Image (cartoon, rainbow, N blue to C red):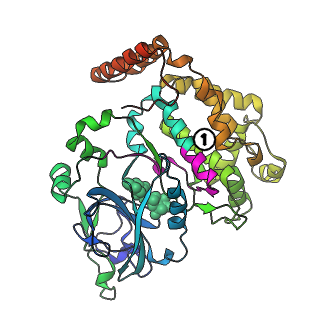
Amino acid sequence: MTEDHFVFGYDEDYEPASAYTPGGLCPIRLGCALGSPPRYHVLAKLGHGSFSTVWMAHDRVRQRNVALKIVVARSLRTSQEREILQRLSKAPRANVVQLLDFFEHASPNGIHQVLVMDLVRPLHYYRSEFRPMFVRTVLRQIIEGLEFIHSCGIAHGDLHPGNVGTAVPEIVPLSVKDVWGCGGRPTTLALVHSSLDLNIDSYPPYLCETMDVEQLILCLAPGVSQRPLSIRILDLGNAYIVDGSPSPKCITPMGYLSPEVAFAQIALGDENAPWDQRSDIWSLAVCIYGLVCKTDLFPFVRDDLLHEMMMYCGEVPDAWRPYVRLNPFPQGDVPGIVLADKLWKAKEASLEWFGVENAPGLVRLLRRMLNLDPSKRPTAAELLRDPYFAEAQDFYPFVYLQRVLTFSRRETIANLFHHLFVSLELAIRGRAPSNRKFFL
Ligand SMILES: Nc1ncnc2c1ncn2[C@@H]1O[C@H](COP(=O)(O)OP(=O)(O)OP(=O)(O)O)[C@@H](O)[C@H]1O
């Protein structure tokens, strides 16, 4: 089945209608109840990925709102996500999404695994207004989350800004009326098929657009956005337990791929290259850069990716030389430490322009992580001991105030006052504790 079978065709705001097929996605209607006995009342769609749709639901037993990840039926026996989330939930730590419950749900497309998780809002919501002076505390939390995942013997395998979020504060449990009273009418796309051969029960009557959780929270509890942010790493759907068994196929988006996997895929045509926690460290560096600078560090174009990696890392590994001979660098680009230093100097300047605290320290941290040789990359635990997280001089009130003012020239007066109050608080304390939370 293709999108052509549906009258309204493909629209990138929705999951592909053709994924509603035996073995594929589970057809869901807003307002239905899932679980046995039914306890999760589906309120809105939160997103979709290659293997699932994710819904906001109200848990009638615990009287709280949760996220339901409903996985494609063909993954029922193969997905390790539940096992991995259970392993992580045994010693719960704040910076990784928590598995609250799980069950199986039968639909005309098969049996689906449903993972009940705490509600998270993806961090890319903040990309346009990421407060640069708090970057360090956010980064520390992300790395702490990854360090916890790695310490449980797990590699994540799909780190990018869309898979980093923040905990949604417990607001009053939301009913359907609350959600749609604030969020307006759900935007849907009617699914009308043009072929009589399709099983009408295999797909839902309409597709739902993703709800803007941020708007909902602002509407229901405006004060909540002033609370400390608490980072959550999401989507352990491609994670695996590193125990000597082969790693699953790497599905990290092209620009976030580690060089060991990118080289195998691009230069050798090997789509099943092995990867592990060290590959996560590379992807994390690219993810951090994307979150802070709102642009991608590496291109998503296959033909350019390896060249860019070599230029930013300042070396051509011996194993890559045959590839470079066949695909020479454009004239003038001579990869080496001189060019790499120049490129990173420019990156440092743009980080400074964004008002990021200790931009040189952040660049040094990123360059440690972006080593073409996986064995030379620091572990997540070593990253937490990087001087970037230990240096405190930026928290001296006057330096801090100056950064706030620099940034606030590009912001509203309201923000300026907010940051002045935070600065005042810091001035009274002398300095912030190292694990100070991130405020918006
Ligand atoms: N706990 C959650 N709370 C809120 N939204 C979530 C949650 N988990 C996932 N989402 C949203 O749903 C989207 C899809 O989820 P996820 O990435 O886990 O699915 P996937 O099928 O494994 O996707 P991928 O193609 O990345 O492997 C996410 O990008 C995110 O926006």
Q: Position of residue 18 (x, y in %)?
A: 39, 74
Q: Toward which corner of the image does residue 68 lie, by quadrant?
A: bottom left
Q: Residue at x 42, y 33 (%)?
A: 130
The foreground one among 244 and 346 is: 244
Classify 10 Å Cα crowding around label 1: few (below 14), some (14-19), many (20 and above): many
Residue extending furthest toward the top: 398
Compared with residue 308, is residue 118 higher up or lower down, i.e. above or below? below
Asked if the magenta segment contains residue 377, the reply would be no
Quarter of the image with the C terminus is top left
The amino acid sitting under disc 1 is Ala
Camera sees residue 189: yes
Residue 325 shown left or right of residue 272 in the figure = right
Location of the N terminus by quadrant is bottom left
User: Which quadrant of the figure shows ligand 1?
Assistant: bottom left
Q: Nearer the viewer, residue 288 or 420?
A: 420
**Residue named by callout 1:** 285
- SS of the residue at dot 1? helix
Q: Residue furthest right?
A: 318
Q: Across the whole image, how many numbered discs are drawn on residues? A: 1
From the viewer's perspective, is residue 293 above or below residue 213?
above
The percent coordinates of residue 11 (x first, y second) are: 34, 62
Image x and y of residue 252, in percent: 57, 56
Q: Position of residue 284 (x, y in %)?
A: 59, 45
Residue 271, quarter of the rendered image:
bottom right
Q: Which residue extends farthest bottom?
A: 197
Q: Is residue 157 magenta?
A: yes
- Residue 178 vs residue 103, the one in the foreground: 103
Segment tinted magenta in the rendering: 145-170
